[in-house]
Image (cartoon, coloured by chain):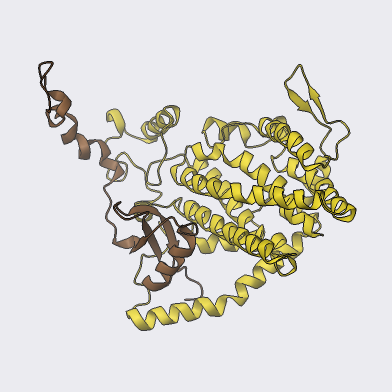
Chain colours: A brown, B yellow
Amino acid sequence: MTNTDWPLWEVFVRSRRGLSHTHAGSLHAPDAELALRNARDLYTRRGEGVSIWVVPSSAITASSPDEKDPFFEPAADKPYRHPTFYEIPDGVQHL
Amino acid sequence: MATAAAHQTAGTPAYGAQDGTAGPAGDTGTDAYQRAFDAAVAADERIEPRDWMPDAYRATLVRQIAQHAHSEIIGMQPEANWITRAPSLRRKAILMAKVQDEAGHGLYLYSAAETLGTSREELLDKLHSGRQKYSSIFNYPTLTWADVGAIGWLVDGAAITNQVPLCRCSYGPYARAMVRVCKEESFHQRQGYELLLALSRGTPEQHAMAQDAVNRWWWPSLMMFGPPDDESAHSAQSMAWKIKRHSNDELRRRFVDICVPQAESLGLTLPDPDLKWNEERGHHDFGPIDWTEFREVLKGNGPCNEQRISQRRQAHDEGAWVREAAAAHAAKHTGAGRSGGTGATRS
């Protein structure tokens, strides 16, 4: 183990109650417990969080940049999913 | 900072390279990737770890981010030197928090460098063997307590001037790391200024100590912006890639203009007889910088070069048993000992 880097972990921090966890960064740690402690020291030195998740980087599946356009293309031609698509006469309220 | 996505196929071209599918706009081959990259940079978009990027762009970023990370952790040494001798509990607590921040900044930056396909181990190895550099400024000694103030005000001040534009750097992970660093750096500069102010307003001896520290740190701080524009090897390309947003001389001039009134408020002088306001240019004129000294320190002949690296190596070696114990503990309790990702070694 001496000549190997510790595994990589992704750190997610909830900045305050009512908000979701957001990605803060990554770090190396030998196990989950130390990853949590290191994350506290590294990413919440000034009260930036009330809760932390650490996830092994290898456990994350990401969409591929190779297909970034085709992958998200189905959303591009459906403007009718947005409320601004619809014409409503002036004066109609609460809509 | 590093995103998870970075750790799976970092280094492989985006836009459909590996499987032979067409690149953007139906093109094939490297030209198409180059055009997509150029367009993203031109549009002020950020390049992310899994995007295709020119090899030279990647190499430049690794070199710069690694040097930056190394500077943060080597920079812990000159200041940590004074923790046990801080004149009050308040100053001691502040200094410990600052040195801890520098460690944090190093870690943010190492993570950013690792998204480019290098590993933490490789980076540390290159630091320890002198194949990657750190900022020359940390090869100067901290002779008195006032040096802690001068480092905060001038060295961190110069670093902030350099780093604020890096928050808009074209490489996403580096820019995000810099946002975090800059937020924390402001405390570093203000505590240094306050420390110098207390000394400057103290006894004549304390005032003289503050002035002496400023005299010694002023010129090395100006050198932190790097060689003049016409001698800077990497500047033009880095600016074209939008890694760098302003030239060395421009940032240096900005820093001098900021410091002059701050020195006046401190009741201290800056050690440059040529320093004066130039109405026409709207900037201060200042005297010539001794670049011979800069190059000597860079070559390894500064007052503390050897000490910094040998201390760094010693700390790493003496920490080996802690790393081994943690790994053994992890192995015992998770079965494998490597329950997390595969580490930073990515192909």
**Relative to A71, residue B152 above or below:** below
Of residue B202 and residue B139, the one placed in the foreground of this image is B202
State the image coordinates of residue B203 (x, y, percent, origin top left).
87, 54
Residue B175 shows in the view:
yes
Q: Can you say whether B177 is above or below A33 in the image?
A: above
Q: Residue furthest bottom?
A: B332
Image side of residue A64 versus residue B325, left or right? left
Q: Where, by quadrant of the figure, is residue A36 drawn? A: bottom left
The quarter of the picture where the C terminus of chain A appears is top left
State the image quarter where residue B237 is shown: top right
Can you see residue B27?
no
Q: Position of residue A35 (x, y in %)?
A: 41, 68
Which residue is located at x 44 percent, y 42 percent?
A: B172
What is the x, y in percent for residue B343?
A: 41, 64
Residue drawn at 47 percent across, 37 percent down:
B170
Total labels: the figure holds: 0
Q: Residue at x 62, y 58 (%)?
A: B98
Rendering quarter of residue B251: top right
Residue at 25% x, 35% y is: A69
Image spot of residue B76 (x, y percent) = 65, 60
Left-right relation of B278 to B317:
right
| B297 horizontally vs A76: left or right | right
